[in-house]
Image: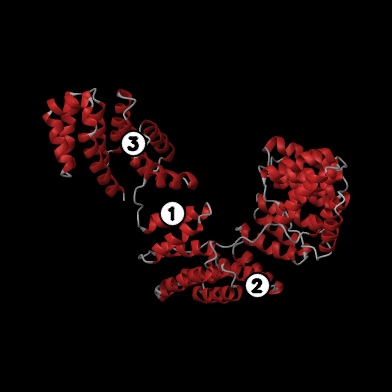
């Protein structure tokens, strides 16, 4: 790709310089007076880079202050791999002529090939300022932004360039990833169709399957993984067997995931099954059984995974998550304490211990754990949130609010801090301050139904009827089955004198409430793909 791009730029530069830029007085002087420069151009057109470099070096000695000669010489140096010298030529060209757009573009292209994305971006943006219609500068700026995963900017620049996009698998996978990230699913599907017709490496096939799973094209993803599995030799197929099991898990086919993971474990027996490789298999099986509501089988599998890889905290976190899901808190506490004996510095395990104590109602122990995390300078909001929850459950709402205010000073504005501070202030009978906290939470995460619900509740308590109705309606839009939002809406409409809507939402609020998600536990840690 790099060599092809250089050739494309060469053809562009030569045509551009000889036709358009020949009007420059400095360029005319070189063209007319320097046989070396003319020979260099001819060699460049004939793709004889070494000859061209010799001639441009001669031309540079004759005209050391000519920025364009230096820019051309930089091109040749870049092609033969002398990037540092090429960059120096471009920078000197820019110093001699700060308005020489080509030198900025050349430098930006060079830095992109070196994956120095920030200087590449700066140089290409300077080129575009000087020549807004330079399609190549827009194109390579788009490639820079794509590599930097700044997808909105990347697609804007690529489309503005009107250049044909590469049809290779690497670029298409990168583009699909970006399209999915910005919600352009139709573009993603079109690029995936192009991928289907290409010969892909094992790693690229796996990436394609992962992308298909992310847009819920589960059957196609499984088909890709099955074909990938079939083309492996028996002696080297265990990783493909595992990745097929993982694909089933991510597709929500938990029965097949567990079955395929057992096939994988049979393939790695006897030695590897008693190792971290085996731990991945047992962890996947445990997660699958958990989704199938087969709690005991899940715990047995997750225990096996944790025993095979005691230094890997993810396996123990999965085990304790399932234990807590089944309300087996003493076992979860014991398991975490065992893990801390092996890995005493694990932040995640300390946090899980606090969460297990909190869930078990052992508030003094939970408070001690969370205070230790906060005192040690917790870099995340989670320890503060855990401590605040303990304080709220033990009737110390104002203290919880103070803890979260301190967290905000140290960590900046975070949704969870604002949201739980709003809960604490509401519990402390400070509705106006709670309102401000929930307003901040909604600004930080406009799509959180619980934040809108509590903001609406605060507005209702303060007598702001129309504002309360608007927020509660938004909470219901985001979570249509939320019974508390319906109940509060009924009350708000009744206070506003709207008996019809009051009755409508009063009836709806009798529906079965949805169980809240535990804030401190999180989801399972799914093992990564194993592709070599």
According to the picture, the residue beneath numbered tag 2 turns out to be 289
Label 2 and label 1: CA atoms lie apart by 34 Å
Describe the element under mark 1 as helix, strand or loop.
Answer: helix
- Residue 30's place in the image compared with 119, above or below, is above
Where in the figure is residue 402, as x and y percent of width and height? 80, 38
Q: Earlier in the sequence, mark 2 or mark 1?
A: 1
Where in the figure is residue 109, as x and y percent of width and height? 34, 40
Residue 362 visible at all: no
According to the picture, the residue beneath numbered tag 3 turns out to be 105
Describe the element under mark 2 as helix, strand or loop.
Answer: helix
Q: What residue is drawn where x is 44% and y is 37%?
A: 118
Crowding near pointer 3: few (<14 within 10 Å), some, many (20+)? many
Residue 468 visible at all: yes
Q: What residue is drawn where x is 38% and y is 59%?
A: 169
* Front-most of residues 472 and 346: 472
Residue 216 sits in quarter:
bottom right
Q: Are marks 2 and 1 in contact (CB under 8 Å)?
A: no
* Front-most of residues 343 and 65: 65
According to the picture, the residue beneath numbered tag 1 turns out to be 174
Crowding near pointer 1: few (<14 within 10 Å), some, many (20+)? some
Where in the figure is residue 413, as x and y percent of width and height? 68, 39
> Is 200 left, or right, of 464 in this rendering?
left
> Is 370 left, or right, of 461 in this rendering?
left
Where in the figure is residue 251, as x and y percent of width and height? 56, 68
* Front-most of residues 439 and 119: 439
Q: Earlier in the sequence, mark 3 or mark 2?
A: 3
């Amino acid at each position: 790709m790099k060599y092809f791009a250089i050739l494309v730029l060469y053809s562009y530069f030569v045509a551009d310089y000889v036709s358009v830029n020949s009007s420059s007085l400095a360029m005319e002087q070189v063209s007319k007076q320097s046989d070396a420069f003319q020979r260099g151009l001819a060699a460049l057109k004939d793709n004889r880079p070494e000859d061209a470099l010799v001639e441009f070096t001669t031309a540079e000695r004759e005209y050391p202050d000519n920025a364009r000669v230096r820019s051309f010489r930089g091109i040749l140096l870049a092609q033969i791999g002398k990037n540092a010298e090429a960059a120096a030529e471009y920078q000197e060209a820019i110093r001699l002529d700060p308005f020489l757009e080509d030198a900025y573009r050349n430098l930006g292209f060079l830095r992109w090939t070196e994956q120095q994305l920030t200087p590449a971006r700066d140089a290409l943006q300077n080129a575009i300022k000087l020549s807004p219609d330079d399609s190549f500068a827009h194109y390579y700026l788009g490639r820079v932004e794509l590599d930097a995963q700044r997808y909105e900017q990347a697609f804007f620049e690529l489309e503005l360039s009107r250049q044909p996009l590469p049809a290779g698998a690497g670029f298409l996978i990168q583009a699909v990833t970006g399209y999915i990230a910005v919600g352009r699913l139709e573009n993603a599907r079109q690029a995936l169709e192009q991928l289907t017709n290409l010969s892909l490496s094992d790693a690229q096939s796996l990436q394609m399957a992962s992308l298909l799973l992310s847009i819920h094209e589960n059957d196609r993803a499984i088909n890709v993984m099955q074909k990938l599995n079939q083309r492996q030799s028996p002696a080297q197929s265990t990783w493909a067997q595992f990745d097929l099991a993982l694909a089933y898990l991510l597709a929500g086919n938990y029965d097949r995931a567990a079955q395929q993971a057992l096939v994988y474990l049979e393939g790695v027996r006897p030695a590897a099954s008693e190792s971290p490789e085996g731990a991945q298999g047992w962890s996947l099986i445990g997660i699958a059984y958990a989704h199938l509501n087969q709690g005991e089988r899940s715990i047995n599998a997750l225990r096996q995974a944790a025993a095979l890889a005691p230094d890997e905290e993810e396996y123990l976190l999965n085990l304790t998550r399932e234990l807590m899901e089944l309300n087996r808190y003493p076992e979860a506490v014991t398991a975490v304490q065992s893990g801390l004996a092996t890995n005493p510095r694990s932040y995640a395990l300390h946090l899980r211990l606090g969460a297990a104590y909190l869930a078990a109602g052992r508030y003094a122990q939970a408070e001690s754990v969370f205070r230790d995390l906060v005192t040690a300078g917790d870099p995340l909001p989670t320890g503060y949130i855990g401590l605040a929850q303990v304080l709220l459950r033990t009737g110390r709402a104002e203290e919880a609010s103070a803890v979260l205010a301190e967290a905000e000073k140290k960590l900046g504005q975070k949704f969870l801090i604002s949201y739980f501070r709003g809960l604490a202030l509401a519990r402390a009978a400070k509705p106006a301050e709670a309102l401000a906290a929930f307003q901040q939470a909604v600004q930080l995460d406009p799509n959180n139904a619980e934040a809108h619900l509590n903001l609406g509740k605060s507005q209702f308590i303060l007598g702001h009827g129309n504002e309360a109705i608007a927020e509660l309606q938004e909470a219901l839009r985001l979570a249509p089955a939320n019974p508390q939002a319906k109940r509060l809406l009924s009350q708000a409409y009744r206070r506003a004198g709207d008996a019809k809507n009051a009755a409508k939402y009063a009836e709806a609020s009798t529906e079965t409430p949805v169980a809240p998600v535990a804030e401190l536990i999180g989801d399972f840690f799914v093992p990564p793909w194993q592709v070599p």
